[in-house]
Image (cartoon, rainbow, N blue to C red):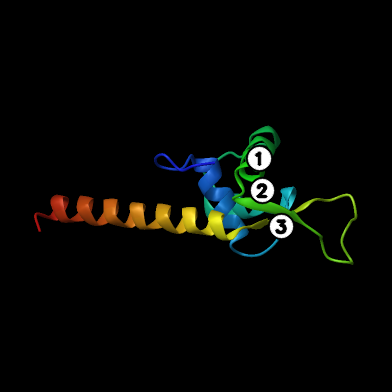
Amino acid sequence: MEKTGPLQPATFLVLLALTGGDRHGYGIMQDVRKLDPAFELGPATLYTTIQRLLEGGWIKEVSGPESGERRRRYYRITREGNAVLQAELQRIDRKSTRLNSSHLGI
């Protein structure tokens, strides 16, 4: 999966949630809710996003903790996914800086 512009909100938030460590689907949903309480991430959007990220190599499925529920699938951000996320964070930062500068007349 190649990044061709700004990331979709669900993609951005799922990748961001996975920077905190391996998560299963429900854990990702909880983290996304903490990151952006206004963003509604339902199960269909979550698992469609996860599938696209897996296919693109931005995340991968990993073994969960030994004490965890065996049927849960856990996910981890990959090096490529992290690079895409960092590029998006830099894009947002540059845009924010430009907006602040032009708004403040700097």
Give me the disc on residue 95.
none
Q: Is residue 3 left or right of residue 104?
A: right
Q: Horizontal and vertical percent for residue 20?
A: 61, 64
* Among the two numbered marks 3 and 2 on one chain, the one whose residue lies closer to the N terminus: 3
Dots 3 and 2: beta carbons under 8 Å?
no
* Looking at the image, residue 98 lies above or below residue 21: above
Spatial distance from mark 3 to mark 2, Cα to Cα?
A: 9 Å
Q: Is residue 7 left or right of residue 30?
A: left
Q: Nearer the viewer, residue 57 or 16?
A: 57
Image spot of residue 54 (x, y percent): 66, 45
* Circle 1 residue: 46
Which of 63 and 46 lies nearest the eye of the viewer? 63
- Earlier in the chain: of badge 1 and badge 2, it is 2
Which residue lies most toward the left here?
A: 105
Is 57 left, or right, of 104 in this rendering? Answer: right
**Between 83 and 88, the one nearer to me in the picture:** 83
Element at badge 2? helix
Residue that carries the numbered disc 3 in the rendered image: 23
